[in-house]
Image (cartoon, rainbow, N blue to C red):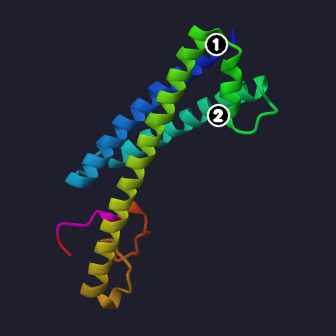
Amino acid sequence: MIFKKCRDILLKESELVQKIAVLQTMIQNAVVAREWTDFETHFRTMNDMGVEFAALEREREALFAGQSPDLGDDKGRFYALVSELPAEQRNELTAIYRSLKLESLKLRMANETLMSYISEARATITGFLEIAFPDRNGRIYTPQGRPLSHDMRSMVLNQRM
């Protein structure tokens, strides 16, 4: 019972991490190519996947904590849980768990790289606008003359200044 439930949760998390990685690659390629058409849709989808992943993670943590509440971290609880299983089941779960952790680490590193790239691009654009238009005091305006927020949507500039 515990094996099947743990395996199902880990496989769902692994599948979701793979989907997030594909979507993150699409976002990264869109940013590099400056293709902004479906950008908001990608971010909404990414947020939805993040919510789903957090729910699976809470379910996994609850399962681990229910079996080994006295052990501190998630990793220790997992290995305490699988140590009670037969060798074949233990090997299968640990392979899935390690793969999930590795893919999550790769995803986190790719995300940090993308965010670094976006931050550098934003700093470059902000620096250019401050030099080119010192009278605007770092503000970006809409064509109607209203200030725009400083979120990522304001990075998309018109064809003309």
* Residue assigned mark 1: 3
**Picture quadrant of residue 18:** top left
Q: Image height check: is 106 above or below 92? A: below
The spot of residue 13 in percent (x, y) is 52, 27
The spot of residue 155 in percent (x, y) is 32, 65
Q: Is residue 91 left or right of residue 131?
A: right
- Extreme residue in the right direction: 70
Q: Which residue is drawn at the image coordinates 37% and 65% (left, top)?
A: 119
* Residue assigned mark 2: 75
Q: Report the magenta stretch's main SS.
A: loop
Q: Which residues are magenta?
A: 155-159
The spot of residue 33 in percent (x, y) is 20, 52
Q: In the rendered structure, which amino acid carries the disc numbered 1?
A: Phe
* Residue 103 belongs to the span the image colors magenta: no
Q: In the rendered structure, which amino acid carries the disc numbered 2?
A: Lys
Is residue 127 among the parts visible in the rendering?
A: yes
Q: Nearer the viewer, mark 1 or mark 2?
A: 2
Within 10 Å of disc 2 (Cα), the crowding (few <14, some 14-19, many 20+) is few
* Residue 157 belongs to the span the image colors magenta: yes
Q: Which residue is drawn at the image coordinates 37% and 61% (left, top)?
A: 116
**Picture quadrant of residue 66:** top right
